[in-house]
Image (cartoon, rainbow, N blue to C red):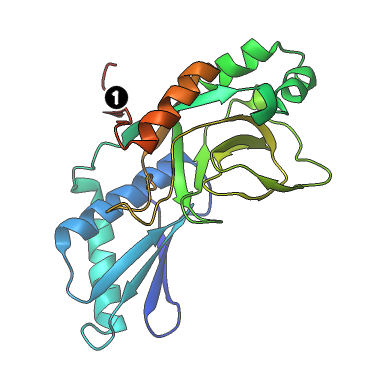
Amino acid sequence: MTMIEIKSLGDVAIQVSIGDQINEEIQREIQGFITGLKKAKIKGIIEWVPAYCTVVIYYQPEVISYHILEKILKSNYSAADKVEREKGIVYEIPVYYGGQTGPDLPFVASYHQLSEEEVISLHTSKEYLIYMMGFVPGFPYLGGLPPSLAVPRLEHPRPSVEAGAVGIGGNQTGIYPAEVPSGWRIIGITPVSLFDVNRPSPFLFSAGNYIKFHSIDLQEYERIQHLIANKTYELKTYKKGEDV
């Protein structure tokens, strides 16, 4: 297992660093560590926030001291490889590619001397690991973009893109959960809402799970929009590694 480093972040948080590289093996170790935390149910821990190579744990110092928590976390990490890790959930996200809501699809195709259909086929061919959530509520940082789709960001970012916009920036791809500025190349849009404060669980995704894009036409996009508006749409998911 990777060596870890633990340090204090102020009075109510502690950071566990696991390696210094962005890759799936480190992420698997992080998820194993988190699975152990869930099962341990350590009194005084409020929540934890995973990132590429770290987990920040917020705790109540009046319930558990830093030094005691540090010892427990070290022991928890040492035992993490014996813990049965939870299988990641794969979310099947419908995307309407191209058109007015995917204005940069022609650029991505031209940049790599591909057809637009080949770009879509490549983009929908992977199960993208969600490394962490951030930037704006609900935004998933994804790994696994095929190198043949990596493109430079826009020289002049757009003032805003629509909620649900699917883009590529450098060697990353992602979905914008809200109308925000963006320097990424927008290739499509999903009707699925990634963040909704009115849901019991406002965030659709969480780190350690996966996203699998699939292409839909405009008619299907509008049909799903209608189902979502009527709260009758059911997002398809499956466990990582299962036959689908």
Q: Which residue type does callout 1 highlight?
A: Gly
Q: Furthest residue to the bottom?
A: 62
Residue 126 position within the rendered picture, expressed as x and y whole percent measured from the top left: 48, 23
**Element type where label 1 sits in the image:** loop
Residue 128 position within the rendered picture, expressed as x and y whole percent measured from the top left: 47, 32
Q: Is any atom of residue 194 visible in this view?
A: yes
Q: Is any atom of residue 126 visible in this view?
A: no
Quarter where residue 231 is shown: top left
* Residue 145 shown left or right of residue 126 in the figure: right
User: Residue at (59%, 25%) from the top-left corner?
Assistant: 146
Residue 141 position within the rendered picture, expressed as x and y whole percent measured from the top left: 52, 45
Q: Is residue 122 above or below residue 56?
A: above
Locate the C terminus and report the quarter of the image it occupies. Answer: top left
Number of labels in the image equals 1
Quarter where residue 91 is shown: top left
Mark 1 closeness class: few <14, some 14–19, many ≥20 residues within 10 Å = few
From the image, tell me which residue sits under label 1.
241
Q: Is residue 243 above or below residue 150?
A: above
User: Residue at (69%, 40%) from the top-left corner?
Assistant: 184
Residue 71 position within the rendered picture, expressed as x and y whole percent measured from the top left: 26, 73
Q: Residue 28 versus residue 203: which sits nearer the camera? A: 203
Q: Residue 198 versus residue 17: which sits nearer the camera? A: 198
Q: Is residue 155 above or below residue 119?
A: below
Q: Is residue 45 above or below residue 106?
A: below
User: Residue at (43%, 74%) from the top-left corner?
Assistant: 7
